[in-house]
Image (cartoon, rainbow, N blue to C red):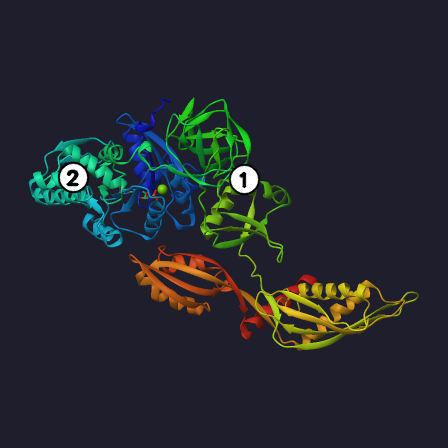
Amino acid sequence: MKIFEPENIRNIALVGHGGAGKTSLLSAALYSAGAVNRLGRVDEGTTVTDYEEEEIARKITLKAALAFCEWNKTKINWIDTPGYRAFIHEVKAVMPAVEGVIVVIDAVSGVEVQTELVWEYAQDFELPRMIVINRIDRDRASFERAMQSIESTWGRAPVPVQLPLGEEKDFRGIIDLLTNKAYGYSLDGSGKFTEEPIPAEKEKMARSSREKLVEMVAESSDLLMEKFFETGTLDGEDMIAGLKQAVMDSTVIPVFITSATSNAGVKQLLDHVVELIPSPLERKPVEAKDPKTQQAMAVKVDPNGPAAAFVFKTIADPFAGRVSLFKVFSGSLKTDSAIYNVNKESTERLAALQATQGKSHENMPEVKAGDIGAVAKLKDTTTGDSLTDRAYPVLFKKVSFPEPAISFAIEPKSRGDEDKISSAVAKILEEDGSLRFLRDPQTNEFLLSGSGQLHVEVAVERLKKKYGVSVTLKPPKVPYRETITAFAEAQGRHKKQTGGHGQYGDCWIKIESLGRGEGFVFEDKIFGGAIPKNYIPAVEKGIQEAAQRGYLAGYPVVDFKVTLTDGSYHEVDSSELAFKIAGSLAFKKAMEQAKPVLLEPVMNAEIYCPEESAGDLMGDLNGRRGRILGMDSKGHMQIIRAQVPFAEMLTYAPDLTSMTGGRGSFHMEFSHYDQVPAHIAAKIIEEKRKSAQEGAA
Ligand SMILES: Nc1nc2c(ncn2[C@@H]2O[C@H](COP(=O)(O)OP(=O)(O)O)[C@@H](O)[C@H]2O)c(=O)[nH]1
Ligand SMILES: [Mg+2]
């Protein structure tokens, strides 16, 4: 593997809504550049980057993956990313590793929900962007409509640099406004093309489009503006340099056209990627922190500086172990050397550095500033860590992931699975920082949480395929609680006269309700030693334990205050145990009068959907006892914000998919506990009683 200088490296992420053709486009780019010797196809499971078993089976990308090729003496590192909402965190995670983003848009559907989301990620990281309108050969593809949807979403910065030669089944190539030529492609996947003059009937359109592009480029620089006014145009070199600067400033976002599966337009795209995307040397210095002082600092991309790299992704491989993907910002990392992990304060040994081509690897003696590499078997390193020269430690900024939106209970299928589950899940979590795993202390279930149902399902598939652990997914139990709504006073008296030693405890308590979330408060107002001090904690404990076991339906009683007012004791027969029992008896009696109710968790939900489904979805949310808080629109999409009881959202994901034809997505997080309406509470209590009886029988 050749070593490239940073000026001859480009790092690019392919992003966009699922199905736009990112994986196919990368496949065509790798084949066109000679990095692989056949055109891999998603539908045949033969692409370089969709290599996981689950990806091949589902024909969708589930994780970010690396590949590279050489074009015009430049190494292009590509990162293919997923486009479905449940995996969109993978896109965010790779943003620190690239200097440019290609946003792929389907010529049939235009801008879609996730397109907008990943665009925002690129914007947050201030990354230069290019747009590719792909699938131009499909039925109902339209360059004009795609451009309209692009402009209505992102304004005037996106400008065509290419025009299609025909559309749908008449598509046969592209017109390139930078080279002023037309390229007729053979559509057999070979990537062969012939240069032709721009057809006469397209000349007028090409001229006006080129004028628009020239004006936009001129507008972005005073110097070019002057030249433009003097000569009325910009020549080739000025045009490329000016456009590159405009791309770096995001004042112009060039729009290209491809048909990935017929491998058309891809070679011109490669030319322009090398010309227009900044090299790592041209990027802004990288934000970092001094680990000692926590002072912000900026690391310049410099091959001669001290070594500094950032681990942006971890792959858990059951055979190779843990593989860390890293971007070098300064100096270089060398095979067979040591490097310092600043986050873990430990030294790591770099056994063999590698370049990654999908699932295969090629050894590299050295990975220089600006380049991306992989290394297996680091002992402490995880995603987000900084690897540097020990004498010059810096901390690069970690990427934050949203909290999971949905939790499922997982149940091991057998005893063997139960033993293996924790270590296997730990490996899956290493790979995917947006999953969470915990044991619910209340329901005792193992909960696996992720950003959507598909996310959790895929994690479960990986557990099985990679680590041989079989679990069943069940909707989580709703963590109901109980509370009281009225004041009550009661006596708890425990008296037992057995053969020798008796038992005696007696207490009077008052209970009253507290505000939501205030938990449990205990106040001791015993006067004159009616209960000796050393027995009072036992009373409190008896009450608390009884409250944990619940009164109505076995859910913990919360948000109430107990005042211990009076009682009596016996010199010989009183004991801690007797007072604990007295406390729990008093609590149960008080509950009889305290008008207990059930509480349920209520979620804050955000639902993203196409405009035309918003009405139906709001009706549906009302049916789920939801309260609509507001609506925003974003391009053609609506965002509905609502509060909905968790119990009503357990099956929301599949329902939303069917109500929006797969175009909607949602996110939710816990908001507060609220009272369950009486008729619903009655049902829950009845069910609980039945299942308890069955359990006992
Ligand atoms: N006709 C046509 N189909 C395409 C094109 N690009 C991708 N596809 C198909 O569209 C589907 C989704 O493509 P894929 O590359 O997986 O999209 P991704 O989700 O963005 O990675 C697959 O069935 C591809 O074969 C194209 O340019 N033309
Ligand atoms: Mg894909």
The residue positioned 37% from the left and 29% from the top of the image is 302
Whole-percent x, y for residue 632 in the image: 34, 62
Of the numbered discs 1 and 2, the one sitting upstream in the chain is 2
SS assignment at label 1: helix
Instruction: Give the residue furthest to the right.
Output: 500
> Front-most of 375 and 218?
218
Residue on which the image places disc 2: 224
Q: How many marks?
A: 2
Mark 2, Cα crowd under 10 Å, few <14 / some 14-19 / many 20+, is many
Check the image and report above or below for 302 versus 475. Answer: above
Quadrant where the C terminus sits is bottom right
How far is mark 1 from mark 2, CA to CA? Answer: 54 Å
Quadrant where the N terminus sits is top left
Q: Is residue 691 left or right of residue 359?
A: right
Check the image and report above or below for 468 versus 377. Answer: below
Residue on which the image places disc 1: 427
Which amino acid type corresponds to the residue marked 2 in the rendered image? Leu
Q: Does any portion of residue 541 appear in the rendered image?
A: yes
The residue positioned 11% from the left and 40% from the top of the image is 228
SS assignment at label 2: helix
Q: Is residue 204 left or right of residue 679?
A: left
